[in-house]
C-alpha cells in the first residue's frame, strides 16, 4: 500500500536465499535446563508451526522474566539458521487485553460493513499519506498477482503542522459514522505501540547489542508504523480475476519495516521457509491474545542478513467465511539509515549502502505500482471504481 502502501516487496526466486553462516551468540543458558527448552517441546507437542513466547510477567527490569524472553527469542534466531524463519508467536495478553482485540475486530467489521458510498469518503487516495479505506482490488501488487483484500489503514496521529510534509506521517482519517471507532481502534494502536517498544528492546538484547535502545530510538512518534484492519472475502465470493489466482488473499512479500505483529480471526497466513515450502501459521487455538511476529527488511539489514525478513502471503478462506486480521507494522523514522551493525561483520553487498526507511517504502510503492499497471494492461485487474489509480502512489 502507499502509506496504505507500506507493505512488502515483490518476491520470487530471491526468497529462496541460501542459509549462510550466522553469527548469533549461543543461548544465554543451557537449553536443557531453561524454560526455553520446555516451551519448545510444548510448542512442538501442541503441533504449533512456530515457537510461542509470552510477555506475561515481564517487568521493567531486565532480569527474571525479561531474561527468559530474551533467551527464547535467541532460540528462535538460532533455529532460523536452519529454517530461514526468525518468526514466532507472541502472547501479548499482558499488554493488549483480549477485550481490546475483540473491539478491534468489532470496529473492523463495522467499518467494512458500511456501504461503499460511505466508505469512499474515507478512500485512502483522499489522504496525503494514504490513510483510510483501500477497497478490494486496490491493494498494491507485490507480485504480478491480484490480491483479494480490503483494508482500513491508520498510523501515529501527527498533525499536518508537525508532519511538515514528511512522507507517510500525518493525521489519520476517522469514520464519523462509527462513534467509538476512533477511541477503540487508536487505543489498540497505542497498546500495540507499547508491545513494539518492548520488542525493540528485547530484539536489541537478543542480538547482544550493548545499548538496548539501539533499535527503538529510531522508532519515535514519527515512525512509519501503520496499522491495518484487513478483511478477506472468502473464495466463494467475488471472483473477477484469472482463475489460477482466485485463492490469493495477499500476494507474497516481505514487510518493509522492522517487524510486524499479526492477529488473525482465521487461518490463511503462510510463511516461506528456506526449503522453499510454505508453512501455514494459523491462529493459536488456545490463546486469543497471540500475535505472529514477522521480521521485516530493516531488521534484516541491521543484522547483515543474519535474520532474514519473513516472506509471507495470505490465502483466501475456502470455508465460505471471511477472514479478518489486525496488522501492526513497526517501522522507523523516515530518515533512519539502517546499516549492518559492525558486530555482524563486513556488510554484504546487498546491505553495504544501507537502507533508509522512507526511501525503502517509496521504492516499494513504485515497484508495486508498476506491477499494478501491468496487471491492468493484461486485463487481470479490474480498474478502480473509486480512484484514477488502483494503488495509491503517494506515501
Ligand atoms: O492479513 C495478514 O495476515 C497479513 C497481511 C500482510 O501481510 C500485510 O498487510 O502486509
Ligand atoms: Fe505483510
Image (cartoon, rainbow, N blue to C red):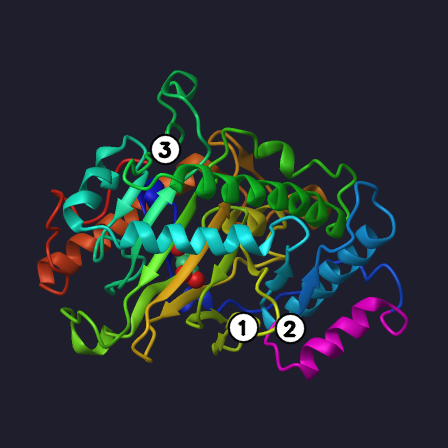
To which residue does mark 2 refer? 82
Does the rendering let one see residue 344? yes
Q: Is residue 253 above or below residue 96?
A: below
SS type, badge 1: loop
- Locate ligand 1 by image quadrant: bottom left
SS type, badge 2: helix
SS type, badge 3: loop
Residue 141, percent from left and from top = 27, 56
Question: Which is nearer the N-term, disc 1 or disc 2?
Answer: 2
Magenta span includes 350: no
User: Does ligand 2 reach within 8 Å of label 2's beta carbon?
Assistant: no
Q: Are marks 1 and 2 in contact (CB under 8 Å)?
A: yes
Q: Nearer the viewer, residue 9 or 352?
A: 9
**10 Å neighbourhood of mark 3: few (<14), some, or many (≥20)?**
many
- Where is the C terminus found, in terms of image quarters? top left
Left or right of 115, for residue 221: right
To which residue does mark 3 refer? 172
Left or right of 330, for residue 340: right
Where residue 30 sits, quadrant-wise, is: bottom right
At x 12%, y 57%, the residue is 376
At x 44%, y 43%, the residue is 185
Question: Which is nearer the N-term, disc 3 or disc 1?
Answer: 3
**Outermost front residue:** 179
To which residue does mark 1 refer? 274
**10 Å neighbourhood of mark 1: few (<14), some, or many (≥20)?**
many
The magenta region covers 31-50
User: Does ligand 2 reach within 8 Å of label 1's beta carbon?
Assistant: no
Amino acid at each position: 500500500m502507499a502509506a496504505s502502501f507500506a507493505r512488502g516487496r515483490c518476491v520470487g526466486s530471491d526468497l529462496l536465499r541460501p542459509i549462510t553462516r550466522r553469527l548469533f551468540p549461543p543461548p544465554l543458558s543451557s537449553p536443557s535446563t531453561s524454560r526455553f527448552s520446555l516451551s519448545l517441546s510444548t510448542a512442538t507437542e501442541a503441533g504449533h508451526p512456530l515457537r510461542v513466547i509470552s510477555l506475561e510477567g515481564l517487568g521493567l527490569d531486565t532480569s527474571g522474566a525479561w531474561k527468559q524472553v530474551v533467551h527464547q527469542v535467541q532460540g528462535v534466531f538460532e533455529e532460523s539458521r536452519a529454517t530461514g524463519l526468525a518468526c514466532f508467536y507472541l502472547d501479548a495478553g499482558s499488554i493488549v487485553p483480549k477485550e481490546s482485540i475483540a473491539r478491534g475486530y468489532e470496529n473492523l467489521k463495522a467499518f467494512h460493513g458500511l456501504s461503499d458510498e460511505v466508505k469512499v469518503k474515507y478512500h485512502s487516495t483522499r489522504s496525503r499519506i494514504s490513510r483510510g479505506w483501500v477497497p478490494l482490488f486496490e491493494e498494491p501488487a507485490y507480485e504480478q498477482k491480484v490480491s483479494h483484500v480490503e483494508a482500513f489503514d491508520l498510523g501515529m496521529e501527527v498533525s499536518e503542522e508537525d508532519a511538515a510534509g514528511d512522507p507517510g506521517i500525518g493525521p489519520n482519517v476517522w469514520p464519523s459514522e462509527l462513534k467509538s471507532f476512533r477511541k477503540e481502534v487508536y487505543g489498540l494502536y497505542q497498546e500495540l505501540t507499547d508491545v513494539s517498544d518492548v520488542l525493540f528492546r528485547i530484539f536489541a538484547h537478543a542480538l547482544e547489542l550493548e545499548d538496548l535502545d539501539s533499535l527503538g530510538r529510531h522508532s519515535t512518534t514519527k515512525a512509519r508504523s501503520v496499522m491495518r484492519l484487513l478483511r478477506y472475502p472468502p473464495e466463494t465470493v467475488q471472483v473477477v480475476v484469472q482463475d489460477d489466482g482466485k485463492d490469493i488473499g495477499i500476494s507474497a512479500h516481505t514487510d518493509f519495516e522492522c517487524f510486524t505483529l499479526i492477529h488473525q480471526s482465521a487461518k490463511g497466513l503462510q510463511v516461506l521457509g528456506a526449503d522453499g515450502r510454505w508453512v501455514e501459521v494459523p491462529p493459536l487455538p488456545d490463546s486469543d491474545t497471540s500475535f505472529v511476529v514477522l521480521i521485516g527488511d530493516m531488521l534484516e539489514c541491521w543484522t547483515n542478513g543474519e535474520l532474514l525478513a519473513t516472506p509471507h502471503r495470505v490465502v483466501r478462506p475456502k470455508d465460505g467465511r471471511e477472514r479478518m486480521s489486525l496488522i501492526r507494522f513497526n517501522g522507523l523514522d523516515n530518515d533512519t539509515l539502517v546499516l549492518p551493525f559492525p558486530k555482524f561483520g563486513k556488510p554484504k553487498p546487498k546491505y553495504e549502502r544501507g537502507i533508509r526507511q522512507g526511501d525503502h517504502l517509496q521504492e516499494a510503492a513504485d515497484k508495486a505500482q508498476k506491477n499494478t499497471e501491468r496487471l491492468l494492461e493484461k486485463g487481470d485487474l479490474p480498474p478502480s471504481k473509486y480512484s484514477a489509480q488502483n494503488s495509491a502512489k503517494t506515501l
